[in-house]
Image (cartoon, rainbow, N blue to C red):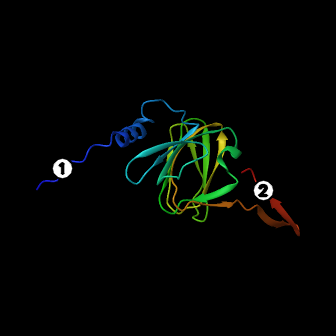
Amino acid sequence: MRARPQPLDTRMLRCYFRNMFQNLIRPLDAFETLVQLRVNGSATVSARPATVEVGLWTVAMHRADSDAALHSDVWERHPTGDEVLCALSGAFTVHLRDHGAPPVTLTAGRTCVVPAGHWHRLAVVEPGDLLSITPRTGTRHERVAPDVHTVEGRTVVETGQW
């Protein structure tokens, strides 16, 4: 005996398609929203700060007119994947810690990939816009320690221009 088809729950389908297409049928302000890329290939858009569970990757645009806009006083690392940084306008310096790599300056149209697990931070050279594609799982942050050294027998703390 063949199983009879179950009636279609149109409420569930309407909900599915509404969620599926809600972000595709209207333009979004890339500086006011975050796109969360999910393991299953879907993308979810949320307002900033993130009000939903973060995805596997976050795509974000940042308008940076000062170092404070990029939390340049904080080192961060992403152990589960590389981070892609792209200067859309302006200029930014990417500092890497613990690997002896010199800082990299990104100007408009230039991209760099920060390898997974590398501590890094950004500084604004010239105000502009930055696109980041960031793996979220396991992301860690640490405050930048001031440069402490001795000059003529005195302890000097230089915070530098972060």
Structural crowding at the residue carrying mark 2, measured as other residues with C-alpha within 10 Å and reported as few (<14), some (14–19) or many (≥20): few
Q: Quadrant of the N terminus?
A: bottom left
The correct choice, above or below, for 78 with respect to 32 in the image is below
Looking at this view, is 39 or 4 the one in front?
Answer: 4
Point 71% across, 46% down: residue:
68
Point 57% across, 64% down: residue:
99
Point 80% across, 66% down: residue:
149
Distance, label 1 to label 2, CA atoms, is 73 Å
The picture places residue 92, in percent across and down from the top left corner, at 61, 44
Looking at this view, is 105 or 133 the one in front?
Answer: 133
Name of the residue lying farthest toward the left: 1
Point 67% across, 56% down: residue:
74
Looking at this view, is 8 or 150 the one in front?
Answer: 8
Specify the label residue 159 is tagged with.
2
Q: Is residue 162 toward the left or the right of residue 81 in the image?
A: right
The picture places residue 103, in percent across and down from the top left corner, at 60, 53
Of circles 1 and 2, the one toward us is: 1
